[in-house]
Image (spheres, rainbow, N blue to C red):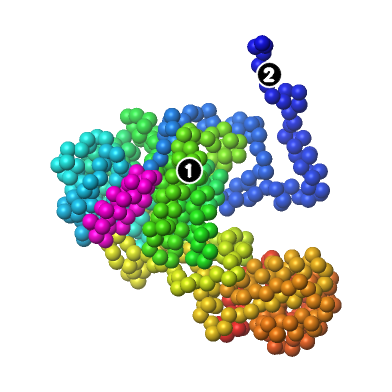
């Protein structure tokens, strides 16, 4: 038996990068490589269609190991275990306790309790945690900022009374006054004075984080990925500065900071974001000369985004949150919260929460994601994205620092204004279908009705609705990406009659079918009833069929060349008995406009604006 080990494919010569590029140019048949295959990201850098080992030769972080500084490859060395977390709003302590005990038996090992500030008490803590063994469960608490120290003292007293092993307990208290500045538009910086007392109150619980960076708020307000990354770093650095200036040891301060970050559907970019975040945070903390490298670890709870969730076709939210959860898990985060699919329009049901839990359990128990240590490490594309995102995030971090730091920029309104500007750009992109929302502006469910669904409002942990009228500063705009389309569709549903859009298909078979399909998707986004057809021999036959169907909109679907023949006769025969629309932007458009035709829909149309205009013409 031969002991010679042969490498596979040694008989083939490895192609060079130039040979790959030459082959691609042949396949493109003269098309522009940069325009067709190079992706220009919202983050400000280009992504190539392929990467090779040579693209990583200058990346130093590639040589690091899992569990070692700078932790780009994760904090753990031998597994990828993460906490499966579910959050519970505490309206009634006994009911919340019963729910917690129930879901702990269904795969959850991390609980998040949101407690109204005016209800924080020893009795509530005792009732809420009755029967829960904190040495086996990560416990996270959120309450009003001015009650955090009080809550911390009560937790320590409760754990000591129960003789729990304090050094082994894991959890957090979500103290983050800066997030209130961003979300509510109020100067709550005075509450920062409680940061040091809070750390002191938790000194017997070394495993408890208490200074939080809630960059998930930026994610839910439509921030681009590099913005969440750069601002999260500046946010964390602000807290690190404040704590050390207040006399807290740098090592202790760093170990008390926790990042609650959002995760959107941009699969590979989100994996890279978390890797870049750990890399950069480790470098920031290192400058404070901590006593150990472990203080340089970034601890992240990833929360799937609400920004891209939809009210209509809401089960698509499951697809979004599943890929988001996969990104977070592959990126080696510490815990994950999956936002239930029905969050946009109701208090999540028991069914929706069960599905959300199972989305994580599936990745653990069936896909074994918890067994893989930095599975993305060494991937040429992800390593490139990690480096590119790190560069863009670092630029933003430095810009904030040079402007006076995150708190100063927040109090000037600059952080909120920048994120809100990104939100506006994304809404504009969705309106023109440059950013797709599956089931909303792209491939909507033609027959779906809202069935009474209405966009859900938000309530803070004080149990008081957000009151923007009291805000002295700009506040984050958390209007979901699909919200304007949803408002349009809901208004259509309230109309006395559902508008009917009839496809008058004629002429070239391939073109009429393609344009009819495009038009059906385009118009159904407003909640119109769309009627496609196999084709008509004459425009008169098509118009008669449309009127018989009681159509409110007649869309002629044909080829560009044939519009010169069919469009004007069809428009004249219709004679104002319904709205007339041409599907496409033919060369003869000016001639058609001169004949009185004013409605055209095509790939460059502002879909949202066009549909609003049509609703207005229909009296909706």
Q: In the rendered view of the protein, which quadrant contains the N terminus?
A: top right
Pointer 1 or 2: first along the chain: 2
Residue 218 visible: no
Find residue 467 and report its image quarter: bottom left
Residue 337: mark:
none
Name the secondary structure under disc 2. Answer: loop
Residue drawn at the location 41% of the way across and 53% of the way down: 354
Q: In which quadrant is the C terminus drawn?
A: bottom right
137 sits to left or right of 351: left
| 245 to the left or right of 404 | left
Q: Position of residue 21 (x, y in %)?
A: 75, 39
Left-right relation of 180 to 344 = left
- Asked if residue 496 shows in the view, the reply is yes
Answer whether residue 301 is magenta in the image: no
- Distance between mark 1 and mark 2 Cα atoms: 36 Å
| Boundaries of the magenta span | 84-111
Residue at screen point 51% across, 45% down: 327
Give the mark count.
2
Q: In what element is the residue under mark 1?
A: helix
In the depicted view, which residue is nearer to us: 238 or 124? Answer: 124
As drawn, the label of residue 6 is: 2
The picture places residue 193, in percent across and down from the top left corner, at: 24, 50
> Residue 552: x, y in percent?
65, 82
Which residue is drawn at the image coordinates 76% and 26% (left, top)?
12
User: Residue 363's mark?
Assistant: 1
Magenta stretch contains residue 107: yes
């Amino acid at each position: 038996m031969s002991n010679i080990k042969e490498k596979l494919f040694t008989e083939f010569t490895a192609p060079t990068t130039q040979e790959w590029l030459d082959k691609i140019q042949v396949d493109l048949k003269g098309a522009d490589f940069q325009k067709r295959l190079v992706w220009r990201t919202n983050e400000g850098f280009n992504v190539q269609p392929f990467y090779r080992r040579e693209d990583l030769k200058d990346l130093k972080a590639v040589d690091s190991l899992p569990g070692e500084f700078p932790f780009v490859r994760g904090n753990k060395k031998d597994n990828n275990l993460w906490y499966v977390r579910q959050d519970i709003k505490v309206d009634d302590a006994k009911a919340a306790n019963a729910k917690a005990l129930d879901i702990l038996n269904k795969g959850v090992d991390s609980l998040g309790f949101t407690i109204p500030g005016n209800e924080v008490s020893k009795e509530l803590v005792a009732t809420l945690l009755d029967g829960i063994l904190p040495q086996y469960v990560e416990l996270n608490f959120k309450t009003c900022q001015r009650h955090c120290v009080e809550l911390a003292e009560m937790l320590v007293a409760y754990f000591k009374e129960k003789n729990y092993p304090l050094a082994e307990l894991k959890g957090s208290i979500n103290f983050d006054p800066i997030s209130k500045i961003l979300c509510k538009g109020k100067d709550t910086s005075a509450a920062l004075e409680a940061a040091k007392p809070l750390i002191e109150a938790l000194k017997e619980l070394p495993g408890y984080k208490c200074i939080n960076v809630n960059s998930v708020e930026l994610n839910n307000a439509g921030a681009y990925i590099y913005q969440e990354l750069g601002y999260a770093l500046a946010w964390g650095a602000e807290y690190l500065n404040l704590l050390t200036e207040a006399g807290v040891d740098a090592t202790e301060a760093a170990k008390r900071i926790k990042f609650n970050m959002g995760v959107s559907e941009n699969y590979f970019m989100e994996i890279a974001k978390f890797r870049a975040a750990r890399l950069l945070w480790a470098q920031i903390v290192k400058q404070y000369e901590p006593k150990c490298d472990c203080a340089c670890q970034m601890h992240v709870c990833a929360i799937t985004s609400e920004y891209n969730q939809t009210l209509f076709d809401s089960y698509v939210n499951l697809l979004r949150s599943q890929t988001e959860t996969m990104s977070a898990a592959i990126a080696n985060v510490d815990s994950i919260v999956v936002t239930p699919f029905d969050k946009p329009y109701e208090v999540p049901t028991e069914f929706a929460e069960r599905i959300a839990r199972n989305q994580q359990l599936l990745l653990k128990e069936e896909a074994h994601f918890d067994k893989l240590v930095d599975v993305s490490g060494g991937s040429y594309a992800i390593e490139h994205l990690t480096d590119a995102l790190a560069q863009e995030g670092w630029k933003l971090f430095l810009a904030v620092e040079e402007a006076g730091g995150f708190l100063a920029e927040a109090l000037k309104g600059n952080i909120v204004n920048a994120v809100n500007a990104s939100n506006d750009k994304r809404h504009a992109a969705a309106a023109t279908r440059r950013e797709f929302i599956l089931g909303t502006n792209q491939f909507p469910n033609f027959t779906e009705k809202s069935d009474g669904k209405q966009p859900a409002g938000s309530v803070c942990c004080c149990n008081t609705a957000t009151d923007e009228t009291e805000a002295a500063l700009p506040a984050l705009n958390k209007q979901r990406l699909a919200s304007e389309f949803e408002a349009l569709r809901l208004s259509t549903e309230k109309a006395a009659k559902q508008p009917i859009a009839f496809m008058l298909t004629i002429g070239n078979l391939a073109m009429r079918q393609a344009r009819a399909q495009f038009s059906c998707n385009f118009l159904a986004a407003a909640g119109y009833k769309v009627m496609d057809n196999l084709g008509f021999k004459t425009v008169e036959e098509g118009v008669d069929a449309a009127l018989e169907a009681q159509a409110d909109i007649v869309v002629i679907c044909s080829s560009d060349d044939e519009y010169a023949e069919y469009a004007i006769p069809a428009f004249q025969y219709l004679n104002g008995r319904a709205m007339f629309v041409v599907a496409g932007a033919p060369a003869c458009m000016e001639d058609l406009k001169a004949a009185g035709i004013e409605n055209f829909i095509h790939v460059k149309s502002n879909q949202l604006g066009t549909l609003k205009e049509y609703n207005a013409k229909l009296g909706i």
